[in-house]
Amino acid sequence: LGLFPSTYAAAIAMRRSIGFKPIDDFAMIGLVNEFPYVIATHRDHAASSLSQLLKLRPPAPLLYGTPGQGTAQHLLMVQLGLKSGVEFRHVPFKGGPEVLNEVLAQRLDLIIDVPILLSEHIKSGTVRPLAVTTRERARDLPNVTTVAEVGPADFDVRGWMGLVAPAGVPEGTLRRLQDEVSSILADVSVATRFAGLGVAAKTSSGADLQALLHTDLNRWGRVIADARIERI
């Protein structure tokens, strides 16, 4: 079995060619969880909200860091820039903690990452959340606006994890796996553990996961084309 992160679709969309079929080579079991990405800055930044950030017209592009070129965080900020007309400049790193250190040192304007990485710094006030990327507000950040509330109204990007098996798994085995996963995710203790990590337990059918992958592949493909990003 394999666990696909949502950034899988972004990574595939960024490739000129791959040696396998990104959907057809797998049997989809279903979603496991979902979560928002948080757009945040350091505590001394001129913008205290996403609305203010989008109105800034600094002499140089706003710098944002992500865990790498072609990640979902990278491409969602490209999408936000295209839709809002604000110029952001991407600074890729090897991981989220490195980006966080640069934001805390105030060498970057923005970080876009998962709630668990930022939660303690948000609580302490060293990091200021500006928005979450899902259409609905995050349960753990109820006072933080969504991008859609103050920016492009159709903006809705969520992270997720999906469980897959190799293509060709017998249908009966696949159904049993789906039932077992649904049963595990229905356990209150599992949902509580997920909530502590800043994610929500989320079940779906294999068909729903496949449709989600198609949607994200198409979304990021359009963003890459519209922004004329060179594929790798």
Image (tube, rainbow, N blue to C red):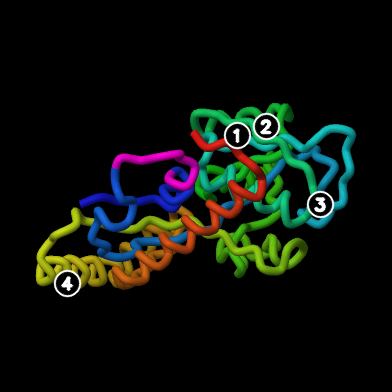
Answer few, some or many: residues within 10 Å of disc 2's Cα (few below 14, many 20 plus, some between 14 and 19): some
Q: Which mark is residue 112?
A: none
- Residue 25: percent from the left, percent from the top? 25, 53
> How far apart are the alpha carbons under marks 3 and 1?
21 Å
Please tell me whether mark 1 or mark 4 is closer to you in this view.
4
Do the residues bearing badges 2 and 1 touch, measured as CB atoms within 8 Å?
yes
Do the residues bearing badges 2 and 3 touch, measured as CB atoms within 8 Å?
no
Residue named by callout 2: 104
Tell me the element at label 2: helix
* Residue drawn at 32 percent across, 56 percent down: 23
Q: Is residue 17 magenta?
A: yes
Do the residues bearing badges 2 and 4 touch, measured as CB atoms within 8 Å?
no
Please tell me whether mark 3 or mark 1 is closer to you in this view.
3
Residue named by callout 1: 100
Amino acid at the residue labelled 3? Leu
Residue named by callout 3: 54
Do the residues bearing badges 3 and 4 touch, measured as CB atoms within 8 Å?
no
Q: Quick check: 209 left or right of 132? A: left
Residue named by callout 4: 175
Tell me the element at label 4: helix
Q: Is residue 39 magenta?
A: no
Answer few, some or many: residues within 10 Å of disc 3's Cα (few below 14, many 20 plus, some between 14 and 19): some
Answer few, some or many: residues within 10 Å of disc 4's Cα (few below 14, many 20 plus, some between 14 and 19): some
- Residue 20: percent from the left, percent from the top? 29, 45
Please tell me whether mark 2 or mark 3 is closer to you in this view.
3
Amino acid at the residue labelled 2? Leu
Count of numbered labels shown in the rendering: 4
Amino acid at the residue labelled 4? Arg
- Residue 17: percent from the left, percent from the top? 40, 40
Amino acid at the residue labelled 1? Leu
